[in-house]
Image (tube, rainbow, N blue to C red):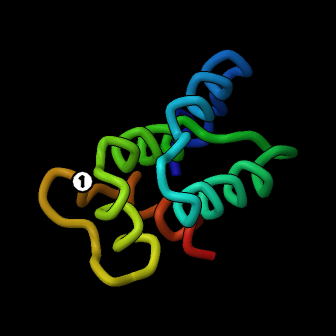
Amino acid sequence: MNDAARALIDERALSKLRWRCRRGLLENDLFIDRFFTRYAETGVSVTQAEGLTMLMDLADNDLLDLLLRRKEPSGEIDTAAVREVLADLRT
């Protein structure tokens, strides 16, 4: 992983990201809240923020399908950043 990928987002960007990650389905919120709790101490990387942002562009049901492993990322969301953050969200 290069230095840019390891760089952490600042508090303001983290706050905006958390707001952006609010979802309509409780199930999605549970996965996302667990992710933010896990990274509260160490911070969220630029790569993780990029992956989360791409996932948040999905409809709630499509996101839930990915989180529950009913589907895998495909098309334009099939990126290393999305796969990394999706693995984090699933554990």
Residue extending farthest top: 12
Q: Quadrant of residue 72 in the image? A: bottom left
**80 and 16: which is toward the camera:** 16
Residue at position x 65%, y 28% in the image: 14
Please state if 57 lies on the left or on the right of 12 as rendered.
left
The C terminus lies in quadrant: bottom right
Task: Write down the residue under mark 1.
Answer: 77
Please tell me whether residue 15 is drawn above or below residue 83 in the rendered image.
above
**84 and 28: which is toward the camera:** 28
Q: Quadrant of residue 62 in the image? A: bottom left
Residue 3: percent from left, percent from top: 57, 37
Residue at position x 55%, y 73% in the image: 90
Please state if 41 lies on the left or on the right of 13 as rendered.
right
Residue 24: percent from left, percent from top: 47, 48
**25 and 20: which is toward the camera:** 25
Circle 1: residue type? Ile
Please tell me whether residue 87 is drawn above or below residue 5 in the rendered image.
below
Residue extending farthest right: 41
Please state if 34 lies on the left or on the right of 69 as rendered.
right
**59 and 32: which is toward the camera:** 59
Residue at position x 24%, y 53% in the image: 77
